[in-house]
Amino acid sequence: MAAKSDGAAVSVEDDNTPRSLSEPGIPAAARPRCTSAGGKPYTLLDCCWVLCALLVFFSDGATDLWLAADYYLRGDYWWFGLTLVFVVVPSAVVQVLSFRWFVYDYSDQSGGDGAAGADTKDSDQRGENDSNVPPVYTSTVPADTAGRVGQPRRCCTVCMWVFQTVLHVLQLGQVWRYIHALYLGAQSRWHSNGPRRHFHWRLMFESADITMLRLLEAFLKSAPQLVLQLSIMIHGNAVLPLQGLSASASLVSLAWMIASYQKVLRDSRDDKLPMSYKAVIAQMLWHFFTIGARTVAFALFASVFQLYFGIFIVSHWCVMTFWIIQGETDFCMSKWEEIIYNMVVGIIYIFCWFNVKEGPSRFRMTVYYSVTLAENVALTAAWYTYRSPLTSDSYALVVVCLVACSFAMGTFFMLLYYCWLHPDGPVLGSHWGGCVDEGVVGAGGVAGVIDACLTPSQGSQTDMVITSPPRTLPRTKDTGELGPGERDRDKERDRDSCLPVFQVRPSPSSSPALLHRTSSSSRAQEGPVIRIDLPRKRYPAWDAHFIDRRLRKTILLLETTSAFSPRIQYRSSMMGSKEVLEYETTV
């Protein structure tokens, strides 16, 4: 059985790993990248986090609707219409997307298996026609077994369709997904090893869907709503209790969803260490204060220059979107989807930083926050200069200090997160030195231990390869010609200097993140391997089997029909095995 992912051949192999990939002469760094489900168990903290997310969702929507009703009763129909539009339109967009995902996941489950079987033929033909590609041995799930799996009774199917339709019409699609995630988490905790893996896969897929939907809704609904309510408060020189509640709920929702998105994204990748809840709270406070300063500056400027504020927002969005496109992100499965995604991220960049490109992000983050700080100062200064005569100087100074202090607090929590709470370890001042231990070079390769001299950002890359094999090693004096005292002094001097002869990137098997995730699963029984003819997307992108729903169906089907958990194997972008063997011989 096999599936396809937008032109990328995907095949499901037998339990045995191909011989060419399991030979001892080929190190793990040159083998294709495998992932498997085996994350940390579902805990009470995870359950409380989902319940708090539900509370944030309801508080944000309820306060906005309550405030819109209050505007209507007060006769402020213009504010009532704008507040209601920023609630209904984004919610409807998200519900349509959520229902579309449900339709694809729930309908035509038997058809998905048939499509997968058809792609097996394509994969086999590809192996036969291309002499350079080794044949792929595929295993097909029996038709009667596949028919029994995922074929609910007809009445249950009708009830589920009606239930989901009513939920999404009532704008409660995310609520159902949150509750479903709680159910899957409880099942993954209570069941034995086999069913636990199946529920863990489903839980990770559901969590990914929730965070994507809620992040989109937050920046389509909560962010504009926050700017609108702050502008109304500043324009009217008065703050109603409901306005304060609505603005606070929108700000908390924005900060919450950014931190939650990053946590779920890290949890979904086995090449990254998971984010602790301390780090999540620090990141949430970081975005809470920086977005707060940003939106207050927006509201101040918009209360005086409505037309110019619209021009500024559109210009900033165009510049940010162009900057993101120039960075050549790799999130989606097609070019046009990638462009649309970049346009949505451009909206996020209006309010806060959002990492969308792998590799060290300090320079890009510094550039972004420098531009943001300059814009905040310019917007606040323009309001202070042209503010209404009714606004006193003391009130204006308090507002200016609020913007400055909020941005400073956000910067503080950002440094706190990166310096002490980052999952990969402290970023500042974390250059690890290494040395080559003494060892004997035999026919099997290097017997010594080579410590990586990498920063955490380098050591956590998905494609971890040897950077540059040395042509030769510098030859020193023959130790046989030295006396015992000279040899001892040389050893002591080398031990004190402890400088790396060459630098390597650790193989996936030695990566701290991978050891954290797969230390127990590596010793477990081998199950079917789903080979995807695509290189694995690098963090902070989602893996292809999270964003391609056809791959999800294949994984869940194999989880149900196979005794062991399937592993995902992406096309390797490593160097060839011949080059690796030549490199070992040189060393």
Image (cartoon, rainbow, N blue to C red):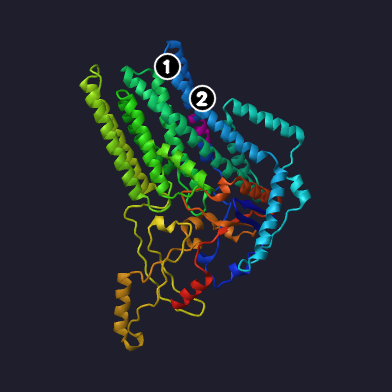
Instruction: Please report the residue visible at 70 percent of the width from the left and 57 percent of the height from the top.
Output: 121
Q: Amino acid at mark 1?
A: Trp
Residue 53 in magenta stretch? yes
Magenta span: chief secondary structure = helix
**Mark 1 residue crowding within 10 angstroms, few (<14) / some (14–19) / many (20+):** few
Tell me if 82 is positioned left or right of 571 in this view: left
Q: Where 29 falls versus 274 (above or below)?
A: below
Report the span colored magenta.
50-56
Residue 192 in view: no
The picture places residue 183, in percent across and down from the top left corner, at 61, 37
Instruction: Please report the residue visible at 58 percent of the width from the left and 49 percent of the height from the top.
Output: 545
State the image quarter where residue 20 is shown.
bottom right
Q: Secondary structure at mark 1?
A: helix
Q: Where 404 falls versus 263 (above or below)?
A: above
Q: Where 504 falls versus 445 (above or below)?
A: above
**Residue under circle 2?**
88
| Frontmost residue, 128 versus 384 | 128
Residue 269 in view: yes
Q: How many numbered marks does the figure carry?
A: 2
Residue 384 in magenta stretch? no
**Mark 2 residue crowding within 10 angstroms, few (<14) / some (14–19) / many (20+):** some
Tell me if 72 is positioned left or right of 173 in this view: left
Tell me if 437 is positioned left or right of 387 in this view: right
Q: Secondary structure at mark 2?
A: helix
State the image quarter where residue 434 is shown.
bottom left
**Residue under circle 1?**
78
